[in-house]
Image: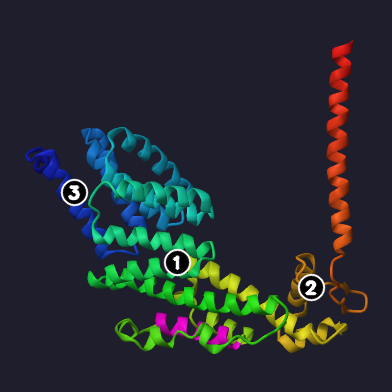
Amino acid sequence: APFFANITKAKCAKVVRAVLDAVCALAPDKLDMQAQICHNIIAWCQAEKRSFLRQRVEAKLASVLFQQDKYAEALALVDNLLLELKKLDDKQLLVETHLVESKIHHGLRGMAKSKAALTASRTNANAIYVAPALQSQIDLMSGVLHCEEGDYDTAHSYFLEAFEQLDQLDDRDKAMPCLKYMMLCRILDGLSKALGISASGTMGIRSDRAEVDISGMVSGKRGVKYAGRDMEAMSAIAAAASERSLKDYEAVLAKYPNELQDDLLIRHHLKTLQEQLLESNLIRIIEPYSCVEIDHVANLIEMPLPVVEKKLSQMILDGKFHGILDQGKGQLIVYEETDTDKAMEKGLKVIENMDKVVTSLFSRSQALRSMMI
């Protein structure tokens, strides 16, 4: 405290932030300790009325709370901080805070709010110089949101931008997730195209290896530099997706739990991918049958009977195929898909339009009658 009293507020803020960043860099996994240090600095700033420093430490605390999955606390802190920053028009801190807000809403699965926060961050970033490290985080978040929307090509381009910036900064820890996201986009894009072909008519079609082949990314210059368990995990996922093998896919998830389950984006999309593979395999198995025992389907796909039964009922309700489950006999009865009756659809539309006309005429007649009375 005596040292801080003898130096200017600007230099004091610079020293405190440098020490905080150094501590966080040396112990990146000790989030509780980081949060406690931030709380102590904020309390000191409030006592000493150091608003400028307090706001920056609060932004850091919000980021730490987000990493701890304490989304409610982080969001409350960010909302209060943004009210102050908008009055001061601190562009640099607004960029960082809106970016944290976007990450929090993404963690809460609020895509619309996450996109709005990222747009606000980009708008403020356009008015100032943004360091490459921060710009890479903005590009990374843009890629994440495009990936959530299913636009894998655009997402891949954003991840590539972020990766190249971080690679130039030689920040391996932050560049590695970008490379994994790029591989994930290639896998999802290839498999979604293959499943799209299947959905258009040929059920159970085998995807082309080239569609989900990421060997170029693995064996290239980047792959050699960033070789390790993370790259092996994504390569194994690509191989299982290419083979459309649910058993291999689950084996990979069990073999690489930390590499595939710790990241929010990868965990969410791999779960979706698993559901797609399961549906694809089930459709391929039941395609030749009009009536088949559910137990036989479960044995072919090598999964527990209750899981298969639940998934088949869900697919029937979602309209993936037409059929019923006869639980008394333990059978699945599949109906042939029939073309919809176009005449009936048009007839229903005509009746609907006539109903609107009659309702409109009735309301007008009532209005005229009230005027005459």
Residue type pointed to by label 1: Thr
Q: Nearer the viewer, mark 3 or mark 1?
A: 1
State how far apart marks 3 and 1 are (Cα).
39 Å
Tell me the quarter of the picture where residue 366 sits: top right
Q: Residues within 10 Å of mark 1 (few under 14, many from 20)?
A: some
Q: Secondary structure at mark 3?
A: helix
Question: In the drawing, what numbered circle is on residue 16?
Answer: 3
Q: What residue is at 53 percent from the left and 61 percent from the top?
A: 149
State how far apart marks 2 and 1 are (Cα).
32 Å
Q: Earlier in the sequence, mark 3 or mark 1?
A: 3
Q: Which residue is mark 2?
A: 321
Q: Which residues are magenta?
A: 230-243
Residue 59 shows in the view? no
Q: Residues within 10 Å of mark 2 (few under 14, many from 20)?
A: some
Q: Earlier in the sequence, mark 3 or mark 2?
A: 3
Which of 361/35 is in front? 361
